[in-house]
Amino acid sequence: MTPEEFRVHGKQVVDWIADYLGSIEKHPVRSRVEPGAIRAALPAHPPERGEPFENVLADLGDVLLPGITHWQHPGFFAYFPANSSGPGILGDLLSSGLGVQGMLWATSPACTELETVVVDWLAELLGLPERFRTTGSGGGVIQGSASEASLVALLAALERAGGDRQECAVYVSSQTHSSLERAARIAGVPVRSVRVDQDSLAMDAGHLAELVADDVAAGLVPAMACATTGTTSTTAVDPVRKIGEVCARHGVWLHVDAAYAGVSAVCPELRWINDGVAEYADSYATNPHKWLLTNFDCGVLWIADSAPMVAALSTLPEYLRNSATSSGEVVDYRDWQIPLGRRFKALKLWSVIRWYGAEGLRGHIRTGVRHAAEFATLAEADPGFEVRAHRPFGLVCFRPLWAGRSEVEHNALTLELMERINASGAMYLSHTKVGDSVVLRMAFGSPATESRHVLSAWRRVREEYERMGSAGN
Amino acid sequence: MTPEEFRVHGKQVVDWIADYLGSIEKHPVRSRVEPGAIRAALPAHPPERGEPFENVLADLGDVLLPGITHWQHPGFFAYFPANSSGPGILGDLLSSGLGVQGMLWATSPACTELETVVVDWLAELLGLPERFRTTGSGGGVIQGSASEASLVALLAALERAGGDRQECAVYVSSQTHSSLERAARIAGVPVRSVRVDQDSLAMDAGHLAELVADDVAAGLVPAMACATTGTTSTTAVDPVRKIGEVCARHGVWLHVDAAYAGVSAVCPELRWINDGVAEYADSYATNPHKWLLTNFDCGVLWIADSAPMVAALSTLPEYLRNSATSSGEVVDYRDWQIPLGRRFKALKLWSVIRWYGAEGLRGHIRTGVRHAAEFATLAEADPGFEVRAHRPFGLVCFRPLWAGRSEVEHNALTLELMERINASGAMYLSHTKVGDSVVLRMAFGSPATESRHVLSAWRRVREEYERMGSAGN
């Protein structure tokens, strides 16, 4: 494809996306296709001859769109909603267009240096401590996702701890993201499950202290604890300061997983989530793709001391040797991540921060918090529903009440209600469990969502609930 | 940014990229900036207020471009060149624009099903065995890079092997990609280094058999061997069939790393690289971003039996449970990769295969092979140069001859010649070591390179060599 053909087809694609975003509400939020339907509609064999680009766009609309669940739909409240934005998409496009590979500083210096600037900007915006800035012994790096950040942090922690991995231990709770358990399995390290408070679901720092003391007494090495600010399930907030005190006493690496809620610290009124981070955290991760207007993927990991991470991940085959690396004056981000190669990742976050400014980012977080409050107010006022009190961010956990039913029946009815709502196509929400109870999750923070969508979402929930009630459920 | 603002700025970005690609030859290939220069030219603090998107584009041109090494320049011959293409860039843009997250089949069925189709298409194009198709017990998945593919394959192999990781072993050679060593360090598994033939640099299957037998005798578990077709350093090709025979005898998982050369099997005349894959390989990886017109990142991993991989990587928190997953009828690609979340990755490769067709992809590989032959012919005809005979793909390894010099002096002069050529800005090549000798690497296969660039690259090499000679070197 020549540059001039790219110019033509590129503008067709931009128009396609602008049209899609402008009319996204006409689609059902959740795809209605059956397993195998999309595959069956596609050719079983690749084309022998090239085709016009228009064919790709035609099939995208005709064949693929019915199989798409529209994460940018204003009625998407499941999981944590996509935080795509125009400048994010365009930053990604610039990265694809430039096509540079930033594994080493030397392979495109601007790729590395813009990233050091942008992660420092974000650290400043979030009020993260000075020792996470790239000007000192640590710094930040853009990962794909928090899963990768967790794994990198764990490998650094294990490097610092030394010794046999089977004799190390990692401390998480039942509410910690599954990526921590996965990282521990990948690294082959045993996991200890710390109790949580049954009400707040926050990690019990006292129990952590007991487990760590037991392991030390048994001659084991407590390598890392993960504290979460804003769990995926219910946005529970672990007591980072108390956990940090335990970690500090025993030289345990403290990783703070703030994948979802961390970015909310752009707002001074939410900066309390950083309490204890400055004093105790060895590493900290948050995902602008979860709530800061940056399309997937964009997760940032900061580390107070990069040395153990680099020691864990560095390899230097002859063909990558170069004078800049040898000088020790530059960062080579290949040693800060699982893969070797990397895109020009910083362009996306740079475009987002410049387009919105700190002011715009704060406005976005506050809108999500406000929408959650609006929805919670409506649900709390309704005797048919119970709302979890914990709601510092954009997520509301609630459940319908089914009088005279057992817990098991209750849960089944709640899931049925969810399924009916999701099948309507008007909105999409998800569920989790708190103790033995299924609760529904409404995650606000999609850039397209307005108050009117919050209100109509509530009405839809209420309607389906009434319908199930009048049908004798 | 509204859809209409996106339409305007999107077209500005498309124009910017088309202009950049159309005039890329005016830039020096390798950036000339000093460490810290780009960072110093950027604001130390993020903006409080949002800025017009035009500011981003202006700074991209004025501040960042001097710090870019232009991987798409027709004079880029270092590492393996970028294989960006218009349809690849646009497929990525569509993925960003749709903004779906395909961790589960249920979170966007088309995202998963198109991927199963596209990896099957590619398997067919490359002549890979039926058991790698997604219709059976195995299948393919798009990873970011071969590093991630290696790690996933290793985790599957360890799962199948069972037992303590410290008592397992992984077999590589000195020529295996560094990502295998890194994967083994991540997983905490000891690595054995198999000897290579000093001339071909191919793995010595006889020595592998000895090492495996020794480990078995010592009560250890030989878990995985990695055979490489087309090493990064010199495109050496390991004897997959012989290695596979050893693996089959001892139940060792055979991973074939064909990151660079694997895609060349679109051409029937290069399909010999698959010899032994159908009978012996448990997993196989190749990167369309290395030589198949697909911009970074796009690596494909196929696996003959997905069960041990899924067992190694699967976690299922309540909030991800859904009826499609429970039915067992669908693939959830989150269990096939290190991260949990994933973009709509298949759109990029789908766009590329449709735009070029099998015919166009073969033409691209053949052009790279032809350019390598053209350059080698010129260098071979020159008594001042020595060319490595092994040259089945797009890479030429060669070295200038410096009469009467020791090996150490010889290597220093060769590196100086490389540095002078790279500093010229007209082209960019890299180096490696074969035994104790530094050799230069010219990697052809950039879509922008034409025969005239090959010729002028040779002239530049020749000129600098003469200049160094006449300066008394």
Image: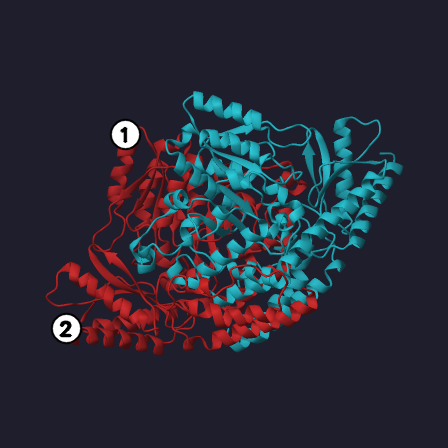
Chain colours: A cyan, B red
Left or right: A68 as drawn, with respect to B336: right
Query: Which quadrant holds the C terminus of chain A?
Result: top right
- Where in the figure is residue A302, as x and y percent of width and height? 49, 47
- Where in the figure is residue B318, as x and y percent of width and height? 64, 36
Residue at 48 percent of width and 63 percent of height: B294
Residue at 27 percent of width and 67 percent of height: B418
The reply to whether residue B337 is in sight is: no
Left or right: A413 as drawn, with respect to A46: right
Secondary structure type for disc 2: loop
Secondary structure type for disc 1: helix
Q: Which residue is mark 1?
A: B217
- Where in the figure is residue B436, as x and y percent of width and height? 19, 55
Marks 2 and 1 sit apart, C-alpha to C-alpha, by 59 Å
Q: Earlier in the sequence, mark 2 or mark 1?
A: 1
Residue B472, disc: 2
Query: Quick check: marks 2 and 1 in contact, CB under 8 Å?
Result: no
- Where in the figure is residue A435, as x and y percent of width and height? 68, 29
Q: Amino acid at mark 2?
A: Gly
Q: Amino acid at mark 1?
A: Ala
> Which of the chains bears the disc numbered 2?
B
Q: Given this view, does label 2 or label 1 mark the residue nearer the observer?
A: 2
